[in-house]
Amino acid sequence: MPPTLASLVHHSALKLTVRAGEDRLDVPVRWAHVSELADPVPYMEGGELLLITALKLDAEDPEAMRRYVRRLAGAGVVGLGFAVGVNYEETPKALVDAADEEGLPLLEVPRRTPFLAISKAVSAAIAADQYRAVTAGFAAQRELTRQAQTGGPEGLLAALASQVDGWAALYDASGAVVATAPEWAGRRAARLTGDVQKLRDRPAPASSVVGGPENEDRVELHTIGTGRRPRAALAVG
């Protein structure tokens, strides 16, 4: 999983304290960014944990803090880290209240925790998540290759269904169901025969999606073969 504000708060070396937005700490963090600009929004992409010392802010002005926090939340910033012991000995109440009103998580950063340590923690967590995704992809590829070589269509479909936590079906050139995995997917696969036949008439390779974002049973259809007419089709749902 990518890093979240909660994982940073629970990071024993960072010693972060939640001052507002405790119920929104499960949000993913795309990056940790340091900016002392009075308005850093033009340089935000969304998903950032913004780290500040309030060098150029009047963090004790309630109205100024409301405007500042509102701008950050509107830009998609997921959290604000405020360093104490630099320009302010403690997190100003005006900032805490503004973050609380806007629902923006506010993390207090102790003097002994450099912003660089937070950035490194986020970067390391993102890299670890990407590494897990890559290794999982290679493992899935190896298993699918092994099943294609030794398990036949049934073994390959079973492995594919397991990898996507769903189901898979193989159709012949006429659109008839050849095999499915798991077995309960047979009826669902049979209902897609018409869609497979339509796909077969398109130049290979071809693919289509049946269902949509609001339909839990979203199915991807793919033709198999590189000739003018596909030799088979695959459904994954």
Image (tube, grey):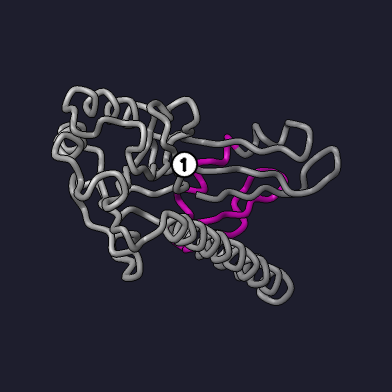
Residue 86 point in image, percent of width and height: 31, 49
Answer whether residue 169 is magenta in the image.
yes
Along the line of sight, the residue nearer the viewer: 63 or 218:
63
Q: Quadrant of the N terminus?
A: bottom left
Q: Name the residue under label 1.
A: 218
**Name of the residue lying farthest toward the right:** 227
Where residue 112 appears, as percent x and y from the top left, is 34, 63
The correct choice, above or below, for 39 with respect to 7 in the image is above
Does the magenta run of residues contain 92?
A: no
Residue drawn at (13%, 39%) of the image: 93
The answer to whether 135 appears left or right of 172 in the picture is left
In the rendered structure, which amino acid carries the disc numbered 1? Arg
221 in relation to 41, above or below: below
The answer, for residue 57, to whether it is visible in the render is: yes
Q: Which of 146 and 11 is in front in this view?
A: 11
**Within the image, what quadrant is residue 62 found in?**
top left
Query: Which residue is at 33% across, 25% downward?
Result: 71
User: What segment carries the magenta color?
Assistant: 166-195
* Residue 166 appears in the rendering: no
Name the residue located 55 percent from the left edge and 36 percent from the top edge.
209
